[in-house]
Amino acid sequence: GAVVSQHPSRVICKSGTSVKIECRSLDFQATTMFWYRQFPKQSLMLMATSNEGSKATYEQGVEKDKFLINHASLTLSTLTVTSAHPEDSSFYICSARSGTSGNTYEQYFGPGTRLTVT
Amino acid sequence: AQSVTQPDIHITVSEGASLELRCNYSYGATPYLFWYVQSPGQGLQLLLKYFSGDTLVQGIKGFEAEFKRSQSSFNLRKPSVHWSDAAEYFCAVAQGATGGSYIPTFGRGTSLIVHP
């Protein structure tokens, strides 16, 4: 159980275009979803946290207008990179948490999406 | 603010040898601690976690970790490494809060290389 999927796994887009990445919790309801960015050989950097039906909370330094996050349902969150530039090329990982009870609050991670902007 | 230090960027071990990956955290109260593994081009898989109770935690794939409050450490161990264990390992710490709305902070990761 507790599977999170991401689509697409890889995407190449041209500079100036927008690209949407989907994150789905397949067998549980995700009250909270997280979006991370990971540079090569580096750790995960939290970009934003989103709760279903609410606006996302962005970390300091992350441009809200560039990285649009929508958490429209308890099983789906999307990250849209608008007007992408080569420096946006990265590995984007989502995670989901049900947070229903107890002290678990475990996050389940998606397999990641490799974005390359040419 | 919470922080995590993984002092070793790379660790190389021979297959069959024992392994210890170091993790130190900075947080005032009792933290929630995690170890994740990431294979190339993949997401993160939870190996084990510590919230409370027994300070020696058993995880999947034969891994264990020990929480040592006095040393602010949560080192990951495995008695005998397999070639398939080669991956990136991340330690993470999260603080509990009212309502449980914590967000973990990740260390920079340790790359494990396994020699045959």
Image (cartoon, helix red, strand yellow):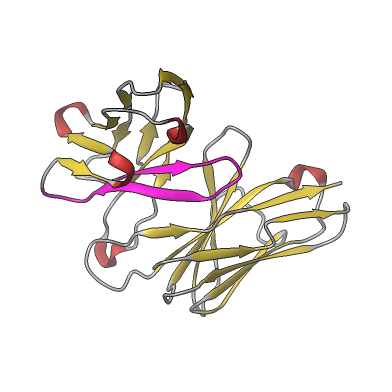
Q: Position of residue B76 (x, y in %)?
A: 30, 33
Name the residue rendered at 52%, 38% in the picture. A43
The answer to which of B44 and A92 lies nearer the viewer is B44
Q: Is residue B14 magenta?
A: no
Which residue is rendered at x = 41% and y = 19% of the image? B13
* Region of the chain picked out in magenta, as a range: B34-53
Q: Quadrant of residue B66?
A: top left
Dominant secondary structure of the magenta stretch?
Answer: strand
A94 or B2, nearer to the observer: A94
Q: Is residue A107 left or right of residue A40?
A: left
In the figure, A78 relative to B11: above or below?
below
* Residue A80 position by quadrant: bottom right
Residue at position x 53%, y 58% in the image:
A110
Q: Residue B3, image x and y in percent? A: 37, 37
Q: Is residue B109 visible?
A: no
User: In the displayed structure, would residue A7 be above or below residue B111?
Assistant: below
Q: Nearer the viewer, residue B106 or A66?
A: B106
Give how far across and how far down residue A70 sits, in percent. Answer: 61, 72
Q: Quadrant of the N terminus of chain A?
A: bottom left
Image mark count: 0
| Residue A64 appears left or right of A82 | left
Q: Residue at x 22, y 44 (%)?
A: B58
Residue that protrudes farthest toward the left in the picture:
B54
Q: Is residue A7 left or right of residue B64?
A: right
Asked whether, in this view, residue B25 is left or right of residue A47, the answer is: left
Residue B87 seen in this snapshot: yes
